[in-house]
Image: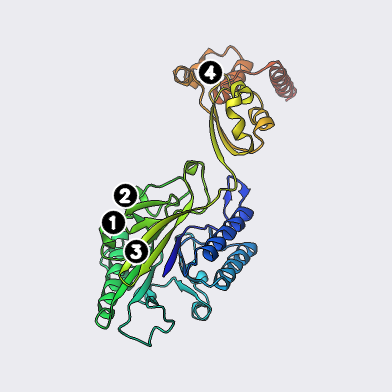
Amino acid sequence: MRLLHTSDWHLGRSFHGVGMLDAQRDFVEQLLEVVRERSVDVVLIAGDVYDRALPGLDVVKLLDDALVRITDAGAKVVLTSGNHDSAIRLGFASRLLERGGVHLRTRVEDLDSPILFPLDGSEDTTARPDAPMLAVYGIPYLEPRLVAERLGTETANHFDVTEAAVQLIREDISRRRETGPVHSVVLAHTFASGGISSDSERDLSIGGLGAVPLDLFEGFGYTALGHLHGRQELAEHVRYSGSPLAYSFSEARHLKGAWLVDVGVGGVENVEEILWKAPRELAILRGKLTELLESEEYRWAESAYCQVTLTDAVRPAQAMEQLRTRFPDTLVLGFDPEDAAGRAKVSYSSRLADAEDDLGVCCGFLDHVRARPGDETELSALREALEAVRLEGAEL
């Protein structure tokens, strides 16, 4: 049996204000191509299928279309909810969807209720109770405050509720192995210790207390993790698939993809990486404005989404407008002047103390907040404004 481990689709998300629905449609097309060409039996989605608890209508339609086309291609779907999803809304009509091959695991009550797949080539899971089975379990994102009591834990933290969920699964596996061989796959939307995070993920808790130890997942045939957006291997059979698209510039160096997992009668036989084609390159540029606009070194970035940090000692006027003449998709602009340390030594209060008149105060403010003194046009405008205020005060 062949599984395709994905997660964190975040349908409906934007990238620094740029809509990504078309890019997400393109990802679905790539996924369908893999399902057909590699004969995938089950597509796993380990949470955060949506980016918001209340997704837009076009976003819901995209998921609906994706699920229909995946099942039409001959694959089943197992989907858990993540911290961005509304578990209740995503889990709506789960029993009905199951008849069409889409299995949702969004409720605590279903933690020890696996989806069973025969590994002997048969379709009927009840025909031979002693036949080797693949049991796929789903652990949705567990908000400790909401589920601790239902899971019987004394404290509401990520470790305790995840440990309780895993224990329920282990007990179910043990019962099933009394009648025949069972191999297990667990989907879990959580932050496992050792995982490398990126800027586009929502913190599960403060201070890293949301991380759960990796050994919680020992003994399972394969653990398909979701939440972290970088595809990574934490142990041989414990992996994050990562998000299919980059959702922050911190992911510029990620190779986006998924894991293709082959399971036979003896358990997991092979895990292979699958790579998705990125719709746009991400460019992180740093330097002086003139250098960025003129150097051939940056030609490759002209069609990329760009994050630019300018290091000019004096902040250039209309910097974004100038950058976009060469890099039209500059989305983030920052300033880090080379002499920033020297300028920081001059406090704003010192600038005010040195000002000789009201115009000096205004000019000092301009220089302080944008690291560039006013030009003649700006000085003229400030003079006129100050004169108008003076005349108005005189009339009163």
Q: Position of residue 134 (x, y in %)?
A: 36, 74
Earlier in the chain: of badge 4 and badge 2, it is 2
What is the three-letter code of the residue carrying label 4? Leu
Instruction: Tell me the SS state at disc 4.
Output: helix
Q: Nearer the viewer, mark 1 or mark 3?
A: 3
Residue located 50% across and 41% down the image: 252
Q: Which residue is mark 2?
A: 194
Is there a contact, CB below 8 Å, between mark 1 and mark 4? no
Q: CA distance from mark 1 to mark 2?
A: 8 Å
Q: Is residue 157 above or below residue 329?
A: below
Residue underneath mark 4: 352
- What residue is drawn where x is 62% and y is 17%? 358
Q: Which residue is mark 3?
A: 269
* Type of the residue with mark 3: Glu
Image quadrant holding the N terminus, namely: bottom left
Q: Quadrant of residue 309?
A: top right
Q: CA distance from mark 1 to mark 3?
A: 21 Å
Amino acid under label 1?
A: Leu
